[in-house]
Amino acid sequence: MYNLILFLVLLTLGYAVGQYAERRHYRSILEREEKYSGLPAIASKYPPQQPHYGQALVTGSTVVSVDYFKRFLAALRNLFGGRVTAYESLLDRARRESLLRMKQQAAALGADMVFNVKYETASISKGNGNTIGSIEVLAYGTALIAPPAR
Amino acid sequence: MLISNLELIPGRKVIEHLGLVQGSSVRAKHVGRDIMAGLKNIFGGELKGYTELLQESREEAMQRLQRQAEAVGANAILNVRFSTSSVAQGAAEIYVYGTAVVLD
């Protein structure tokens, strides 16, 4: 009985706080995506030949975790199969946040664009039951910095 | 030292390839961070402690990469890649590798 109450409390707590935090995070992501829309991240390996841009490696990383409620949803999904939206939104948030952090670093260097952007995803707390728990997403690329006008 | 994940630098030529250089770092977090992470597992959201931890260890791996490149006499590292793997519960390995070259 006690366990059931604890479980329900965690579930509601996870739902309330998790939903609130996610909505707030998405709002902040959209805001910053707008802000950095002038600094494109490009997945091409071949930088423009002219002018001779300066280069610097830029990175951005995020570690995020799902809340208790979403983990419960995902566990249910494991029974029936199908799309696990709970984890989809988690990964989406982490990717976009990492890309924004990378862009932020590039903007601080005065870059015009970021080339050869790569993502790297790793699950951090593996072995903790068989849930995904938390994931790390790293975004990295080469910032191209325009040479000073001669 | 120029570090880039592109394969060529416009306007500069690669004179010499010096082979693969690498740097790695394995770190574990301390207990305080673990407890915070446990709470976050209920509420969800970003684990700032882990983000910082991984960033620090990535910087360390980059320093090792750079030191190795300096040792072989390179002045640039091209085509740099990152890779992360969780070795055990609570520890992650960060691995960075790239090609050491001499640019004119």
Image (cartoon, rainbow, N blue to C red):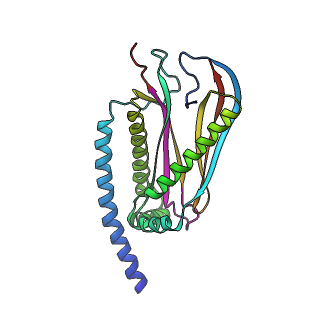
The N terminus of chain A lies in which quarter of the figure?
Answer: bottom left
Q: Would residue A87 appear left or right of B27 to someone viewing this image?
A: left
Q: Would residue A24 appear left or right of A138 to someone viewing this image?
A: left
- Residue A76 is situated, as x and y percent measured from the top left of the image, at 45, 66
- Residue A106 is situated, as x and y percent measured from the top left of the image, at 42, 34
A121 within the magenta span? no
Position of residue B95 relative to residue A87, above or below, is: above
Position of residue A95 relative to residue A110, above or below, is: below
Residue at horizontal 64 percent and vertical 46 percent from the top: B24
Residue at horizontal 59 percent and vertical 35 percent from the top: B80
Residue at horizontal 48 percent and vertical 53 percent from the top: B52
- Residue A70 is situated, as x and y percent measured from the top left of the image, at 40, 63
Q: Nearer the viewer, residue A131 or B100?
A: B100
Q: Nearer the viewer, residue A111 or A69?
A: A111
The C terminus of chain A lies in which quarter of the figure?
Answer: top left
Q: Nearer the viewer, residue B73 or B62?
A: B73
- Residue B54 is situated, as x and y percent measured from the top left of the image, at 52, 51
Tell me where the magenta segment starts and ends, as one range.
A124-144
